[in-house]
Amino acid sequence: MLARSFARVASKRVAPRAATAVRGFKTVQQQQNAEEIRAGKVPIVSYKDGMREEIELPVEQQNGPVAPAGADDRKVAVPLEKSILSKLNPTMAKFTLPGKVAVVTGGGRGLGFNMAQALAEVGVSGIAIMDVQQKLGEEAARELSEQTGVDVRFYQVDVRDGGAINQAVSDIVDHYGQIDVLLNAAGIADSNIKAENYDTEMFRRLVDINLTGAFLVAQAVGKQMIKSKNGGSMILVASMSGSIVNYPQEQSCYNASKAGVIQLTKSLATEWARHGIRVNSISPGYMDTALNRVPALDAQKKIWIDQTPQKRLGAVDDLNNLAVYLASPASAFMTGANNIIDGGYTLW
């Protein structure tokens, strides 16, 4: 569920207008990144065996980025030895992705980065990380490349900008020759805002990032997969909030946006099955990400844990194996499924 956490848990207690402004940057670096994007450039950083190369792609238009603050714990990814592949039995081999190329949005940190690590551990040859935050995206690409030797590229892209997405996807295909997996983890969360007080600009912005952004990326990647005639697997990160109403926080917009992602998943799965493209969603429960480790949420976390049968929050790597399963041939007969992974929270 709140993969991006409750970044604005106290937004109704602090100047909500400032929090909703699309150009409300928290750092000088974010302001500079936004100016670069508005100037019509998509910075792309590649890493191969830890070596950095930077280029820029022109785009027709851009919106300002939205970038939550904070940092997440990192675990070291362990590459898959190629010699092991030939020794795997048929069942285990289906959980690997040798030679495949994955696109991961929101892969600069948190759950997106950890799932990118998991894909690297099962043999992918290339990973394209899309994130709006340049520093985090570059660090993630460099770290993942150094850990695994995988050819990793970073694209500074705002998922609300269709032109930038299309250009980046085109460049990914030019560089890697293909796209086999899309993992869409980009998104934001606004919470503890009563519906009667919800600012309309904030509402539109969240839906634009969480739902419209998911569609724009899926559309761009889908066109390439259809063109290649090789099929592929798409994984959209939704939330258990798309299926239930959370307690005790009010978050009508977030819930609605994630319900939209779940229905989008089913719709795309139906339309693109004939092209060999599978589309599934992951709906996390309450996750123990860095943005949830703040004093303002201590009281709410006690309630969340108490209402979860496993009596804990999800760890940042709890989604990894599910992401690998959905991306790999192991789930070949699975499409349009919404996979709730919440420690049992939605059972009660």
Image (tube, grey):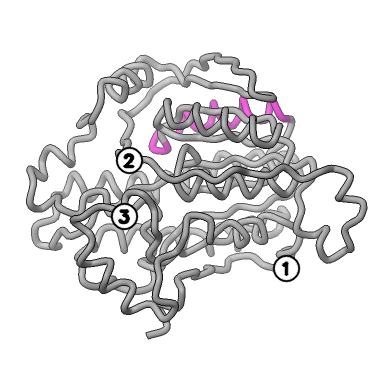
Categorize mark 2 by other alpha carbons within 10 Å: few (<14), some (14-19), many (20+): few
Q: Residue at x 31, y 25 (%)?
A: 30
The disc labelled 3 sits on which kind of residue? Answer: Asn
> As rendered, which of 299 and 32 lies closer to the eye?
299
Q: Residue at x 64, y 23 (%)?
A: 50
The residue to which callout 2 is attached is 70
In the rendered structure, which disc, 1 or 3, sits on the residue that comes first in sequence? 3
The residue to which callout 1 is attached is 333
The disc labelled 2 sits on which kind of residue? Answer: Gly
**Which stretch appears magenta?**
159-176
Assign the magenta stretch its main secondary structure. helix
> As rendered, which of 8 and 180 lies closer to the eye?
8
Q: Are circles 1 and 2 on residues that touch, CB within 8 Å?
A: no
Residue 23 drawn above or below residue 195:
above
Q: Secondary structure at mark 1?
A: loop
Categorize mark 1 by other alpha carbons within 10 Å: few (<14), some (14-19), many (20+): few
Q: Is residue 71 magenta?
A: no
Residue closest to the far bottom? 348
Answer whether residue 226 is visible to the viewer in this image. Answer: no
Q: CA distance from mark 1 to mark 3?
A: 35 Å
> As rendered, which of 185 and 10 lies closer to the eye?
10
The residue to which callout 3 is attached is 292
